[in-house]
Image: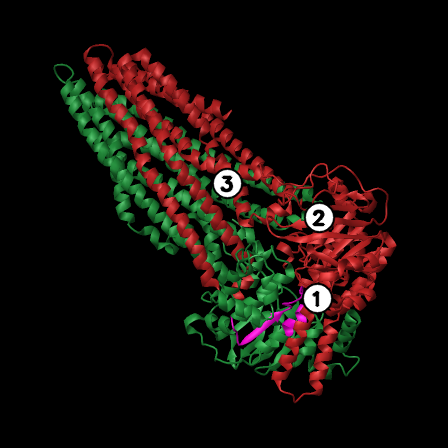
Amino acid sequence: MSTADSTAGAVTTAPQGTWQTLRRGLALSPELRTGLLGTLVLAILSMVGRVAVPIAIQQGIDDGIQAEGGPDLRRIALGATITVAILVVTTACGYLMMRRLFTVTETALATLRVRTFRHIHDLSMLHQQTQRRGVLVSRVTSDVDSITQFLQWGGVILLVNSGQILVTTAVMAYYSWKLTLVVLLAFVPSAVLIKKFQPMLSVLYGEVRKRVGFLYGAVSEAVVGSAVIRAYGVGERTQAKLDDTIGSYQKAQRRALRMSVTSFSTGELAAGLALSAVIVVGVLLGVDRQLELGELIAFLFLVTLFIQPVQIATEVLNEAQNAVSGWRRVLDVLDEQPDVADPAHEGVDLPGGALDLTFEHVSFNYPGGPRVLHDVHLEIPAKTKVAVVGETGSGKTTFAKLLTRLMDPSEGRVLLSGVDLATVRFESLRSHVVMVPQDGFLFDDTIAANVRFARPLLTDDELQQAFTDLGLADWLAGMPAGLHTPVGERGEALSVGERQLVALARAYVADPDLLVLDEATSAVDPATEVRLQHTLDAVTRGRTTVAIAHRLSTAQAADEVIVVDKGVVVQRGPHDELVRDPDSIYARLYASWLEQTR
Amino acid sequence: MATAGSIVFGLLTIGTAYVTGAVVGKVVEPAFADHRYKLGALLLGAGVILGLSALKVLGIFGRRLGSGFMQFKLQAIYRQRVTRRYMELPPSWHAQHSTGSLLSNANSDVEATWWPIAPLPFAIGSIVMMVVAVGVLFTTDWVLALVGLGVFPCLFALNVVYSRRMAPRQAKAQALRAAVSTIAHESFDGALVVKTMGREQAETDRFAAKTGELRDALIRVGRLRGIFDPSLDSLPSLGTLAVLVAGAWRLQAGAIGLEELVSVTLLFTVMAFPVRAIGWVLGELPRSVAGWDRVQRVLTATGEMAYGTRDVPGTGPVDLEFDGVEFAYGEGEPVLRDVTFTVPAGKTVALVGPTGSGKSTIATLAARLLDPTCAENGSGTGSGTGTGGSGSGGGTVRIGGVPATELSAADLARTVALVPQLSFAFDDSVRANVTLDRSAAGGSGAISDEDVWAALGTAQVRPFVERLPQQLDTELGERGTTLSGGQRQRLVLARALAGGPRLLILDDATSAVDPRVEAAILRSLRDTASGKGATILVVAYRRATIALADEVVYLERGRVVAHGPHQHLLDTIPGYANLVTAYEKAEAEREREHDYETDTALEDTALEDTAVEDTAVETDTAVADGPDELLEVSR
């Protein structure tokens, strides 16, 4: 199986065998073993009933029907009654087994889902971006579903059938070890073939799982971009792409099924072979007086009981390849080591109060990409308000991401109040440092719930106060249900500017010591922005603020401006100072800004 | 084919039982009795069993491949139908459905719907087999036949009860699957916010709670299965025992021989498994029905915007006219009231207003991604379908004099290009993102690479693309994540320009672009606009953008407050002046602060507060008595 969608930076893992995957899977979900022994015992007991029937038939024919002095009906009835009693008990065992199995597997897999979900969040932003969102969703949904389906459908059947095969083989051997040998031999060729088919199936089902991920990705894009698709009238084009993804998923399914059926049918041939061989050898043995007629007949039943589970097991093994592929993909996600890792218990906490920050010869390049920041070396004192300006693609946003440890520098260190960012516990980091990203992503909930995101215990009054502090009380009052106005998926019920207002309030109530604003008000009207700036000034007094700005009004209001050009810090200082050199990059940016706004 | 295959398989299964029985009776029993055997007869018996087995393999292939392929095909067809529907349904419908649940509809629900197709032919084959078996039983012995008649309906009844009880549990589970998928999608979509706020654990808890519900629902499904599955399994065994007892009695009565008894008991044994297939179908049926319901909800969703058949006449720039347009999202308060304005052909109009005043809604209506809301019934969307153009209720948007609702989809896309506030890039190459496989303006073939480069040039993103390793063939990744915000915005701008639109709508489309770059873009847009001839409606805050416009439409709270040349509005509308000169005022403020540097901060704050209040008062006055008069003036 290819690991095509693993990240560029990650080590390409070798294709893993089925057993290896299962072992790793079981190791990661130890809950699956809870009460496994008991479940196994119940499984074996539950199929004793089935074996009891042929024994009853053998007894019935040999001792009842062929009894001396004609058929002995009472004896047959007695045997049947005992067998019915056994059946009742074993059916109850079957119920208990399934109940246990379902509880254990569902619990274990729910845990696996949650763990994978958490792990995806722990992966760095860069890591997350290399995976399509739809693909990630398929990891915690349909891939885990495929494991569940296998463990329950396949798992039950495999357990019951393994039990049945074992018990039947034992009973067969009791009747005639020679015939048993014949049966086992008849299955050897098909066993060899099936074993050969397994790796091929593994590849084919791996492809199927991959296609499911692609399907999720394609549907997700079409749904999220539906407005653009409509505006440009390119529905047909998108549909063609979707049809393509759907079609190749279908093709992958068909290829896998074809192989799976081929594998399955060898079992049927083996069954025919076993049945006819038993009759031939049985007759030979019978003629030789080594076997009773009843025994041979019972044996024929037993062969049927042996064949069925073997066939079904083949089937389950085939299905298993699908599940194992799903499992493998989930495990692959869990195997990805977060490259921006939380030092957790080994980490340190940031000191309280305003933070100063230091970039120590920091360089950054995306994996395999060009360098976007070159040897940035600077200090920003505590309680200052700094604006970072520069052209699109100059490295401003990268600067912000390094500052908030969404990414780690390729070279150099970032320090907050003298503490290396890489050693700070995430919990401490995220409570002291908050960034408001460009795109004010909101969750599909109310305004209140979104603002409360980082401080779940805030009361409505406190939220209201936050909006008042920011000078947004009027705006909030204009919303249909005030704080309780739903914002829609991704906040789409609000305008982009309004989303930014909510995102800003969300960061404000988080009460950080270092606030990083990445063009956080780019879609807000100028009057509101200026007002916000004033109020932000008031509320962030005493904290350190870094604002990535494209509107130079922000830069003008800052204590200091840092100008980035092509990944290099080219100028820094207060606005007034920087504009004095008319040929500087900043002066040119500012001139252009004036031209724009006057 | 699948059904035929499984019927063949079923008949062969019965055949095997009988042939085995016959071989036992005709060959084995005499051999045991006489202690010698006829080699020919023995081999013939073995050969027939082997032959039947080979035929069964054919049956398996027919059944399994047939039913599997059918299942996959139906899944594919329905996935196509569902996703096609996603394309057809308007933005207002999408706004009410989360991406996660739509993902679930297209995958897991479709899968659930057609899941029972796979075992279905097997089940049909099994039913045929049962009927034949009962028939064969009657020819063998009526008592044994009655036993069979007793067992099979029992199986059937048990299955029916099973699926009845299962249905609600499965429906619940399927709905929860969608809910889990929704949370996962939203959470991964907002990963940046989750990360920057350090809310990974809280998000995990939210996900875990839903996953827990799903787990409990699935365990409830499992418990029910636990009761029925083993019972269904043991019924055929009970039947076999009943046959044994009854058979022995009949044997004693001399009605049947040992051969028949063996055949019949063997028949019950081999049929136990196929009969279970019926149970599978019935057991999965509830999940299938639940899936089907959810799929149908998408397929039968209404509210799509029907397109008309008319084209915008002529070539060159077209005018845009809003005539008494009202709009409300869903059942909410109207966000636009009686919006009337015209953008004459070839002119540029700037749409200005505070955050949340309805500018984006106007831009969206102008591109007919939404239709005006009917005032009378106040119901959501889709009001403009069919007749359109009468201007009743929600007013009318006209493009080139034709009501937007009467335009054909193709002509609408050809005529109007909207550059939205948030730029959406497709997971495709740079070239494909710009051309979107549309035909070039004027309809002559595809958009050439030359056109693409020209558009990229105008959008000021050409040098960037030229530096990319594969230039136009560079893949952008999902939603263009490899680009910076500004680059993505310019790429999307190039996309709009490449189609050579006759009406270009820019919804604050340069917000993430630096001032200098924006100035360059605007200048060339202006050139392009005059060269190729496009009407431009631009949502703007920057003075430079506004300066390029021939006229300004000023909005507040969903109403057109004023309408006229920039300077005129600046002089007469305080709200407008306040908005567009905010930066200057702020700077002046700072200068003053600078002069009185030693003044206490307290006083400053007080001053600012007053300023804000003043603005609010002024704005309100403007809303109260401004609009009508000014509209008159501007006309």
Give the camera-side residue of B604 and B272: B604
Task: Report the magenta residues as a range.
Answer: A510-533
Secondary structure under the numbered disc 3 in the rendered image:
helix
Mark yes or no: residue B501 visible.
no
Q: Colour of chain B?
A: red
Q: Which quadrant does the C terminus of chain A fall into?
A: bottom right
Residue A522 on the magenta span: yes
Which residue matches tag 1? B619
Q: Nearer the viewer, mark 1 or mark 3?
A: 1
Cα–Cα span, label 2 and label 1: 34 Å
Nearer to us in this view, B297 or B27: B297
Q: Percent position (x, y) of residue A165?
A: 30, 36
Residue holding disc 2: A231
Provide residue A574's location: percent of width, then percent of height: 69, 82
Q: Eyeballing the image, is A358 above or below A117?
A: below
Q: Pick out the residue farthest to the left.
A: A69
Q: Which residue is mark 3?
A: B109
Which residue type does callout 3 highlight?
Asp
- Find residue A51 and report its image quarter: top left
Task: Name the subunit of mark 2.
Answer: A
> Given the current orientation, which residue lies at the most extreme top position?
B254
Would you say residue A27 sits in the magenta stretch? no
Give the quarter of the image for residue A361. bottom right
Q: Colour of chain A?
A: green
Q: Please tell me if label 2 and label 3 are on a single chain.
A: no
Q: Nearer the viewer, mark 2 or mark 3?
A: 2
Q: Dot 2 lies on which element?
A: helix
Q: Is residue B606 left or right of residue B5?
A: right
